[in-house]
Image (cartoon, rainbow, N blue to C red):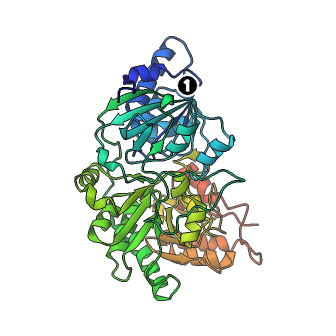
Amino acid sequence: MSNLKFISAVEAASLIENGDLVGFSGFTAAGCPKEVPTAIARRAEEQHAQGKEFRIGMYTGASTGDSLDGALARANAILFRTPYQSNPDLRKAINAERAPYFDKHLSELAQELRYGFLPKPKFAIIEVCDINQKGELVPTTGVGIAPTIAGLADYIIVEWNSYNPKELRGFHDIYQPLDPPHRREIPIYKPSDRIGLPYIQVDPKKIVGVVQTQRPAEVGGFSPNDEVTERIGDNVALFLAQELKAGRIPADFLPIQSGVGNIANAVLDSLSKNSHIPPFEMYTEVIQDAVIKSIKDGNIRFASGCSLTVSSPVLEDIFANIDFFRDKIVLRPQELSNNPELVRRMGVITINTAIEVDIFGNVNSTHVLGTKMMNGIGGSGDFTRNAYISIFTTPSTAKNGLISSFVPMVSHMDHSEHSVNVIISEHGVADLRGKSPAQRARCIIDNCVAPEYREMLSDYLKLTQAVHTPQNLENCFAMHREFAQSGDMRKVVWKTKQ
């Protein structure tokens, strides 16, 4: 280790100047650096106090921990940010136009950086659990775009976080495809295949400093399942069990992708409990608490992902039983975990969460009332467009029934009706395959919409007749307008021609 230069986080932050572009490792709060971003935020505050500009461009894998996104947002230190976020302070800055943000499919960022579509980072800041003089960086619990930014950056700052055991070496499969016109097929044919290195190989000369830390991941806990999330989970499991029985899913089942959050955890719990669904594999982005429990129970055979986004007790359990999990989990760069080629090849069944859905099957994953960014599209598009069966879940209402998650027209569209196969709420399942727009509308209203909104949306359908898509342009956003004005979509009154 004599060739490695150990520095403090403050010294590392002093290397970064106003306007620099910085790439960070990790995916969600898992695997993200913590000490150096916090020190950069303090440096920004000091520069601002002196009347100087200090903001950096930020590339990450996905969302990050509060020590990264939160600290830099509060310090007003963000020149731009991509591709996904979930921090409340950063969200406020984005929606106040204090932090320019562009939303991207997660599978695309690494390759677009290599293509030169986006300016390359000057610095890469990467969290590792081990490092050596040969430039072998072993990531911690999340990979993200770390291999690409490490290769493109002029300088690398390493956060060596000893909270994560060195024995994580071997959990990672680090591989980057060649760029066109030299790209070949990615030789992954089942979730457990490994094709790369167990570490990120970098030029040791680019490492300008190693900051030693011992910080736990900043992954928050998950809320317990409630009646709504349990019913959604049970409806997903029932639908897939019926597809299996009908022979539309192979008898030994197919890999599952599930998004992040409480609904995703509830869905995985229900899948594991359903006796008609055999043990299955995951090919997903985020490996959550429910996945780990199901692996231990024998209901999930293997999980491939980009990060271990688990609560602290679950992560400590993994570390304590690391040899048990070694042959059951692999962590990949998001360019592989979200790769459309692999999703389609393996026949991945995808399950993602919607903010709102319109009665024709278009899905909004990102915006509130069409204008305010929530988190971002994440990997939902990567998976949905290439799924064996694409499923979206959502509670039928929000804010104690004041908002219907089902509306005549989504206020922002991330996934069109052409990509969405199935919608599931706590009330039931709308299988949209092979249905016309009018048939889809009737199916969604009858099966997924909350009872208090069914008559309202049925009346909407009557406003326009004898057309292919019964959409009424005078009323299609009336529910959104009503909520903006009165705070209660239930009060909407449709305009009719006199």
Residue at the location (50% across, 76% down)?
Answer: 429
Indicate the position of residue 226 as horizontal and vertical percent values: 33, 64
356 to 239, vertically: above or below: above
Residue 388 seen:
yes
Q: Residue furthest left?
A: 320
Q: Viewed as shown, does residue 348 lie left or right of 228?
A: right
For numbered disc 1, what is the local secondary structure?
A: loop
Picture coordinates of residue 177, whole percent (x, y): 60, 53
The answer to whether residue 492 is visible is: no
Q: Quadrant of residue 88?
A: top left
Quarter of the image for residue 492 reads bottom right
The structure residue drawn at horizontal position 60% and vertical position 55%, both measured from the top left corner, is 480
Label 1 amino acid? Arg
**Vertical relation: 44 (above or below) 199:** above
Label 1 Cα neighbours within 10 Å, binned few <14 / some 14-19 / many ≥20: many
| Quadrant of the image containing the C terminus | bottom right
**Residue 93 in the image, given as x and y percentages of width and height:** 53, 34
Image quarter (top left, top right, bottom left or bottom right) of the N terminus: top left
**In this image, 274 relative to 378: left or right?**
left
Q: Residue furthest bottom?
A: 246
For residue 227, what is the image quadrant? bottom left
Count the numbered circles shown.
1
Front residue (pair 268, 462)? 268
Which residue position is annotated with label 1?
55
